[in-house]
Amino acid sequence: MNKNIYLLLLLAIGGCAQVQYETLPPDLKTLSIDGATFDAPPAGPWMVKTHTPLELEIGKTGSSEDETVIIDAFVFKPTALEPGADFIKEVKQQEEQDTSAPRFVMKVHEVVPVSIGSATCARSHMVAEDHSPAVHSGSGKMMILEIVSLNCLHPDHPDKAAFNVGYSERFYPGDEDPDFMQKALALVNSVQITKLY
């Protein structure tokens, strides 16, 4: 789960503007990683940073070159849970460690259980102030990072395989997308479990 926030932050920090990436085909209907599929996003162009069976990273700039929208999905080996441990609590604790002060000041952090078939899943929503964003403009101004992510233990091998699908936006205060939650939930609610390869 540590990789969850790390990749979203890495992409949000780096943005998509400086390196030439392949463009996601606009007529693509679904995306996938090993163990899960989900709907491709509308309204591109989306740049593909990585697309392997175990990881997918796509992004686009927001209303300025510093602002980014990122969709990230990856397979990971879950942390060994103690007997009786709560997966929701584990996800929340890991996310708090990944967005710790002084750089980040958490404003909203909710993690709720969700079910996808027989998979144990946790959906989280985070809003954090980023007080040291790496930006193209060099402005040094505080930015907001908002993330909705879905972490699931794969039902075929919950002790060996899990996956994350996340949607994030990084923006300056006042530039938030009023449709953020609708877009993020459309993505994570479209996730379907597939067989592991």
Image (cartoon, grey):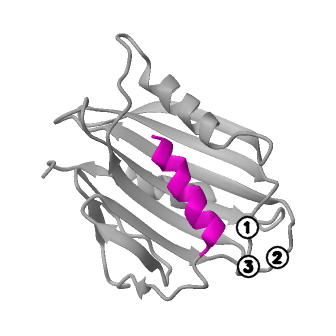
**Crowd band around label 1 with a 10 angstrom C-alpha radius: few (<14), some (14–19), many (20+):** some
Give the percent coordinates (x, y) of residue 176.
Answer: 74, 63
Q: Amino acid at mark 3?
A: His
What segment is highlighted magenta in the picture? 1-15
Determine which quarter of the picture holds residue 108: top right
Tell me which amino acid carries mark 2.
Gly
Helix, strand or loop status at disc 1: loop
How far, Cα to Cα, is label 3 from label 2?
6 Å
Secondary structure mostly seen in the magenta stretch: helix
Query: Is label 2 in a helix, a strand or a loop?
Result: loop
Q: Are marks 3 and 2 in contact (CB under 8 Å)?
A: yes
Residue located 41% across and 15% down the image:
85
Q: Which residue is mark 2?
A: 138
Figure check: 98 above or below 10: above
Identify the residue at horizontal 16%, vertical 36% (top origin).
156
- What is the count of numbered marks? 3
Which residue lies under the disc numbered 1?
134
Q: Which one is in front, 74 or 125?
A: 74
Return the x and y of residue 135 as percentages of the image width and height: 74, 72
From the viewer's perspective, is 87 left or right of 140?
Answer: left
Q: Which mark is residue 136?
A: 3
Question: At numbered mark 3, what does the secondary structure look like: helix, strand or loop?
Answer: loop
Q: In the picture shown, does residue 190 fall above or below 70? A: above
Q: Which mark is residue 48?
A: none
Residue 158: horizontal and vertical position, in percent?
25, 31
